[in-house]
Image (cartoon, coloured by chain):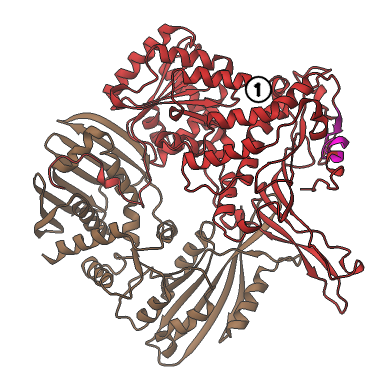
Chain colours: A brown, B red
Amino acid sequence: MIGETRESPGGGPMSVEQIEHELAQLRMNEDGTLGLRASVLNLLVVTDEESAGEVSRSVSNIAGRYPSRAILLISDPEEGEKNLEFKLSAFCNVRGEGHTQVCAEQITIHAEGPPAEHLESLAGPLLISDLPVFLWYPGPFSPSAPEFAGMASLADRIIVDSAAAGDCERSLREIAGLLEEDEMPAIGDLQWAQLSPWRSLAAGLFNAPERAGELGRLRRIEIMHAPDGECRALLFVGWLASTLGWRLVDAARTGDGREARFAGPAGEIVAEMSPASPDAPFRQVRLYSEDYGFEVARSRDLSEACTTVTRNGELLAERTVHLGKFDLGVLLGEELQFRGRDGIFEAALRAAVEILDL
Amino acid sequence: MADTQVLQNVLRDDQRLPRVPEPAAMVIFGASGDLTARKLIPALYDLAAQRRLPMEFAVVGISRTEMSHEDFRERLRSALEEHRSGQVSDDVWESFSKGIFYLPGDSKKPETYDDLKEFLKQLDEERGIEGNRIYYLSSSPSLFSTIVERLGEAGMNKGENGGYARLVVEKPFGRDLESARKLNEEIRRYFEERQIYRIDHYLGKDTVQNILALRFANGIFEPIWNQHYVDHVQITVAEDIGVGTRGAFYEEAGALRDIVQNHVMQVLCLTGMEPPVTFDADSVREEKVKVLKAIRPIPEDKVDEYAVRGQYARGWVFGEEVPGYREEKNVAPDSTTETYVALKLFVDNWRWAGAPFYIRAGKRMPKKATEIAIQFRPTPHTMFTRGETRGLEPNVLVIRIQPEEGISLKIGAKVPGSGFEVSSVNMDLLYGTAFLEEAPDAYQRLLLDLMLGDPTLFIRADEAEGAWAILDPVMHAWSQSKEIPTYPAGTWGPEEADELLRRDGSEWRRP
């Protein structure tokens, strides 16, 4: 597969018709044939100047799996003067023996001044009809931002990153608050997407029927997360609690970490979450029942994870697998797979916020 | 949850997490063969690396070659490296290969099965396999019945301690109707149909499954998918390669057994079947069997009216001169094995009565192409004059399976200009290239389905027998004749195949 990015210089204000015409020109090959446009969704991205480059690369990277029309909106409402700039590009791939060209499109809009508060008026007319609309905030986001309500009204699903602002507590509370709003579309969190392989591996520890019963006998959870992984740790514990029917009894900060106590079917469960030092060799999740120990550990430098099961200290099972990549494109791709509400995420989020609130 | 006893792993009840099969041991008979190293182990390794296998999974290889567990692992690792240069993780392989074992043994001898049974019990205890067994017949087909019989006699046709036992049978499923029936009977003496997974890797291909998606996920096609609107259907499975190093195998098989009985008949079934009520194994396979039952039998004395065979002679393929079939290695100089087959079949049911299915499969064709062409009837009346419709042909919907997956629709459109000339235009939609990610390997998909207990993409006994029943008279008639038409390599088959359609006023498409 060969990829090629084609760009149109763009510039100042353009009409919708001019943009569509220019995008069609970008799909035109040198021999006069027209590259096919393949689209399965519209992707609206609200970002800032600083992150625009990386975000644009991530969008190009997912073009193979989710060919889309991406509309990047870089807004600066603080700027007093009205200013609009457009940049158009097409990412075209060649594949197959017939060398068929398939292009995904990207429209970048810089909006300053008053238009920056009405981004939906810019994005709405450029959406491809009949395709779902995903609204992605790769950086810090706030439901009270001037453009948010208008942009959310265009979307079928909103994707945020609860860790982006560096204030996990606030982000999780805000996202949980959005869940309660009637008209709000479904919401996904890249921190939750990053947990998928961890959750899958943790669930795999209990696949053997004789070990499934240990889920009801868990006593202690220890999570040593990456320095930026507090949201994930909270969501992981929230997932266990909501899935296994635990009731929160107490929660407290312990230095840099947290401790939560739950009442489970078989008694008390203590969950400890603590950040690993940046140079610690492993990130890990450990779950203990009376007799068993379950562990998922990832070496800081490797993309592989090792899972182990022990009984009374004796190793019962062990395996190493790929944990997968966690770059922006991969995480975004995972979130784009889902169209509706993710009940398990929502329950985990509510349980995580409960820990914060107690 | 009311008490401490969680009977199921509730952490898995999440649509975002991949389904992971129960613990199991896969026993591969004929493990020293090519299939194990080239297809099965790479597919299992990929599944393990992608977290799709349970921790408690083991492979036990059996064949007569003397090898230790470690020798077997080394051999598989080398083969994996050969196909995945630089893509094999040492740590993942180390972890995966700890679950690979080897037992040297003669699969004809009962004591081999005593040893195997003991070994599997040991694995149950040591690796928590839970008594689930998959027996994969990757040996010579001549050993299938014996292995099944020995497994049954040893009581291994049932899983241990309430676990399951499944049997995987690689194609060919017999050589003709009689041998297929015999094989099925022999297998079913010990295994129930629900335990048997006949594997045709063709059905594991995403592109083949997409036929179902196109037909049944798009409402616009169904109303015209019948003899009222369809003139005929052409199915083409063309390869540009010759028999290569498979001469000995091909001499025994031929195109009819190698491609038509399985791949082509499956494509025909998927194209012609009624919509299943649900996408589950029984519903889908039931509808496929109905198509096979509806295919009009070909009388042995009229085979020439319905079937054409051919054999490639020396010729040119894409600028390269290639040898004829009889010049290939391990092929008899007077061989009458067919490398090309064309058939005219009628599906005698309400949907397809009178609309023939023309199918062809061949080697050393001008290019590699697999496609289904639905040729629609012309309009009942045209208001345009003959001169105005010079370039206009009936609509054709082509479902391309490979090389470039997609559909193309030939429609009539006005030629720009002041007159009113109507001409045919091809509209191409390459939905395969819209998603640029590579589809998973067919074996990966099928092995996972097998372990998850989903037989939808496997062949049921009556499907295999149904396909043989249609082809049996053809094979018998051809076996009586020492003459076979030839075609130059790099062409679309013998002249007789063109004549087959010409008699009906049709012609083969150029893929």
Q: Please state the horizontal and vertical placement of residue B134, each as a whole percent of the image.
A: 42, 26
Residue drawn at 57 percent across, 18 percent down = B182
Looking at the image, residue A234 lies above or below residue B275: below
Q: Nearer the viewer, residue B24 or B88?
A: B24
Q: Nearer the viewer, residue A314 or B391?
A: B391
Residues rendered magenta in the picture: B485-499
Mark 1 = which residue? Answer: B176
Q: Is residue A51 visible?
A: yes
Q: Which quadrant holds the C terminus of chain A?
A: bottom left
Residue drawn at 67 percent across, 64 percent down = A35
Is B153 magenta? The answer is no
Q: Please state the horizontal and vertical placement of residue B412, each as a whole percent of the image.
A: 78, 65
Number of callouts in the render?
A: 1
Query: Dot 1, how many residues are within 10 Å of its Cα: few (below 14), some (14-19), or many (20+)?
Result: many
Subunit bearing disc 1: B
Looking at the image, residue B379 lies above or below residue B157: below
Residue drawn at 48 percent across, 79 percent down = A123
Residue B485 figure quarter: top right
